[in-house]
Image: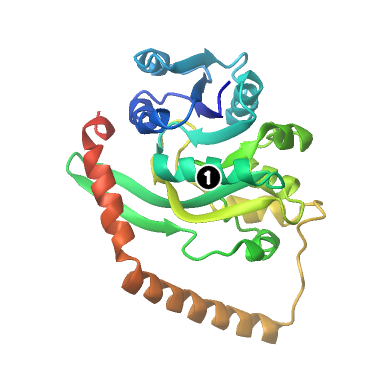
């Protein structure tokens, strides 16, 4: 019996999928995992790249219906009660995933656990750009406020959730081409069933490859401003309150940034070391 099923949706990801799969190899020494790659009718050799890994089950999406459908199909094909979502161009941090699995196994009331990510981009063969950490500061008690402001604090890659919870809330909405993960998090939040681990769980590649792509954060606001979902509510405020709130937000963000730069520079150093270590596969 597998302890964890890692589901990866891929499309035209031949340049990145090997690095993603290699980042999972250490995890296999500590957990019984299965890796499922669902290919959404790629026009490149994504499936052939997956065939180089003996422990990877690569399957083709029954229909070219997009990432949400591919992820749902991957979960249906999985054998474990615990699912780890992953993009085909990101790198997992095995030690943090292992901690997440151990924690969710010990807490029966928790349906989902997530951590932080570090955004990076390969500029050239010998140049890595680190954009930063997200979310910089977060407390699980703040999650409803994030949702209400149409912000998503939950990093999709590296998030672990229970299959029974996923099925109960209906899985990813296949009608949504973007922000389907945020939509799932909002529908699946019941007040105390999410857990946050204050560590970097994945290295999140900024690219235009496959389903990972360049993330469009403004989409969440456009998508959910008119949402009828009862868990998201817009609160109208006066212009004075709005100006004061905006000023307060700017100052708070600046102070958080300064705190991060002063006390968390080691995260950037750690990210660069991690990426340098995997440079050969990243630059293929």
Q: Name the one closer to the observer, 6 or 146.
A: 6
Is residue 273 shown left or right of residue 206? left
Label 1, secondary structure: give it: helix
Q: Which residue lies under the disc numbered 1?
A: 100
Image spot of residue 204 (x, y percent): 41, 45
Query: Which residue does the image show at 53% across and 21% down from the upper left?
Result: 38
Query: Looking at the picture, does residue 260 appear above or below residue 63?
Result: below
Residue 178, visible in the rendered structure: no
Question: Position of 252 compared to 112: left or right?
Answer: left
- Image x and y of residue 103, in percent: 57, 46
Q: Quadrant of residue 56?
A: top left
Residue beneath the point at 77% across and 38% down = 169
- Say which residue appears at 38% left-offset and 27% top-offset: 21
> Which residue occupies the extreme front position in the image?
106
Residue 186 lies left or right of residue 63; in this view the side is: right
Q: Is residue 109 left or right of residue 154?
A: right
């Amino acid at each position: 019996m597998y302890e964890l099923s890692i589901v990866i949706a891929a499309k035209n990801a031949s340049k990145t999928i090997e690095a993603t799969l290699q980042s999972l190899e250490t995890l296999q020494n500590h957990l019984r995992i299965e890796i499922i790659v669902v290919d959404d009718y790629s026009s490149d050799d994504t499936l052939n790249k997956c065939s180089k890994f003996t422990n990877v089950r690569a399957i083709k999406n029954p229909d070219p219906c997009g990432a949400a459908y591919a992820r749902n199909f991957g979960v249906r094909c999985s054998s474990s009660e615990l699912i780890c979502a992953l993009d085909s161009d990101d790198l997992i941090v095995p030690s943090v995933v292992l901690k997440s699995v151990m924690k969710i196994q010990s807490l029966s009331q928790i349906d989902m656990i997530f951590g932080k990510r570090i955004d990076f981009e390969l500029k050239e063969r010998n140049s890595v750009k680190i954009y930063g950490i997200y979310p910089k500061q977060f407390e699980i008690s703040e999650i409803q406020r994030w949702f209400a402001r149409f912000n998503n604090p939950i990093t999709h890659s590296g998030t672990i959730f229970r299959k029974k919870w996923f099925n109960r809330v209906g899985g990813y909405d296949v009608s949504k081409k973007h922000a389907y993960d945020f939509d799932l998090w909002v529908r699946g939040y019941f007040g105390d069933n999410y857990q946050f681990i204050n560590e970097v769980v994945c290295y999140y590649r900024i690219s235009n490859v496959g389903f990972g792509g360049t993330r469009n954060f403004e989409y969440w606001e456009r998508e959910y401003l008119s949402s009828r979902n009862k868990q998201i509510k817009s609160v109208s405020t006066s212009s004075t309150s709005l100006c004061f709130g905006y000023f307060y937000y700017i100052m708070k963000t600046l102070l958080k940034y300064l705190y991060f730069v002063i006390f968390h520079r080691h995260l950037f150093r750690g990210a660069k070391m991690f990426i340098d270590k995997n440079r050969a596969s990243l630059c293929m």
